[in-house]
Image: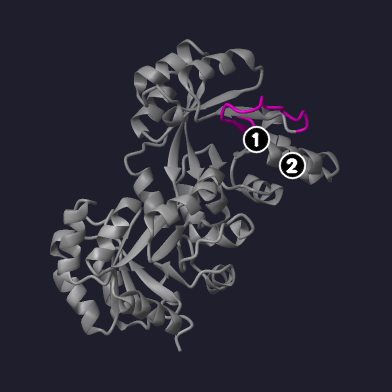
Amino acid sequence: MPRVLIADDGGAPIRVPPMLRAGILLRDIDIAAVVRRAASDDAVIVIDLDSVRGMASDEAAADFVIDTLGVRIVMTRRAHVAAHVASRGGLGLLHALAFDSTGLMRALEGSAPGPGVGTVVSPGAVLPHMRPSELEELARPIVAYGLLTRPADALDCLELAECVVLRQDVADELAAIARDSTQPVRNLLTTVAAEE
Amino acid sequence: MIPVTATGEFLARLERSRCCAAIVSDEQLELALVSRTPIVFVLRGNGLALGPCIRRIHAAGKLVAVHLDLVDGVRADPRGVAWLARLGTDAIITSHGRLMPVIRREGVVAILRLLLSRRTHVDTSVTAVSRAGPDIIEVLPGVILPTLAALMPTFGVPLLAGGFIRTQADAEDVIAAGAVGITTSAPNLWGMYAS
């Protein structure tokens, strides 16, 4: 699991800054574009299953993504689909909308944390505002996704989560900071990659 | 057209105390009734049987806002709106912009809940608000409003903030970022800034 995912919603081609060793999150694009992008990238690919136009958010779609596209990390709002991905040897990320604490707990209802299942917290910017007890409820790895509009937001979240999703412009800023920065910041961005 | 006094009264109460109770349980209702919160936001419960709850809140001298999308038993459609209005709620919150005119026609304050999880939601929110025409908007998660302030458009309607606001510092930052009030389930904040 990379520390940083750059969101690819079908616009300009994603440029992965070498300093970040980032993966790519495919979202808001149609099936054909997903197939094209998944085949053409060397970076780790993650798919936001619920947002792919023309594709269902079910086990059949997850199987297609795993078997045909070779993508092993799938984001979904459905707990049973996340568990299915895990059962296929992939990483199923349960996408929990965290607009308030009540909603977060509701989103996690029915999830069965286990090997191969992690959590996407959306918007990721709330992560630093969550209680330790709430963080403990989340299956790891945790991905902070959404409204991380500044590199500082991303670094705050990386203290608590395994991964952050960033837009290209914020990822570029973060890479520039990492390039000119002290070793601790670089460590924060590369720890997981180094462990792999 | 909604009487000016409905929204005016709602905002006047907020001016007296910026921090409102958001409740999801009977225990929280009891705490809210004896707090200084001017308005109680009901986020859970059986929408078909909220009458006694609303009457108790009114008897405590407070206004009531009911979340149409979150209470059980009531559909987020014009009939559901009419039902809650008949029960006596002062405001209805929903994420369904198309219901804003319906709520206003019932003489109830219309609060549009804006759920922001991605930058695109921020970018498109101004269109959503102008199309819906709410009396008030509530932005969630409110705690990140200060970090989004530079990106937030001007809506032209009063803005509430709710979600993960738990400390006095959170509340102060959110109000400094432009919110006229906050909604929170943290009882220690209810009635804060009461005049």
**Chain identity of mark 1:** A
Q: CA distance from mark 1 to mark 2?
A: 10 Å
| Residue A172 falls in image quadrant | top right
Crowding around mark 1 (Cα neighbors within 10 Å: few <14, some 14 to 19, many 20+) is many
Q: Residue at x 53, y 53 (%)?
A: A126
What kind of residue is marked 2?
A: Leu
From what the image shows, is residue A182 above or below residue B88? above
Can you give x and y, in whole percent of width and height, for residue B124 in the image? 50, 47
Mark 2, residue position: A174
Which of label 1 and label 2 is nearer to you? 2
Specify the segment rendered in magenta.
A1-19
Mark 1, residue position: A4
Quick one: label 1 or label 2, which is nearer the N terminus? 1
Can you give x and y, in whole percent of width and height, for residue A39 in the image? 59, 12
Q: Residue A9 magenta-drawn?
A: yes
Q: Residue at x 84, y 45 (%)?
A: A181
What kind of residue is marked 1?
A: Val
**Quick one: SS at disc 1?**
strand
Can you give x and y, in whole percent of width and height, for residue A165 in the image? 60, 38
Side of B34 relative to A193 (left or right): left
Side of A13 relative to B124 (left or right): right
Marks 1 and 2: CB-CB under 8 Å? yes
Residue at the bottom extreme of this rendering = B195
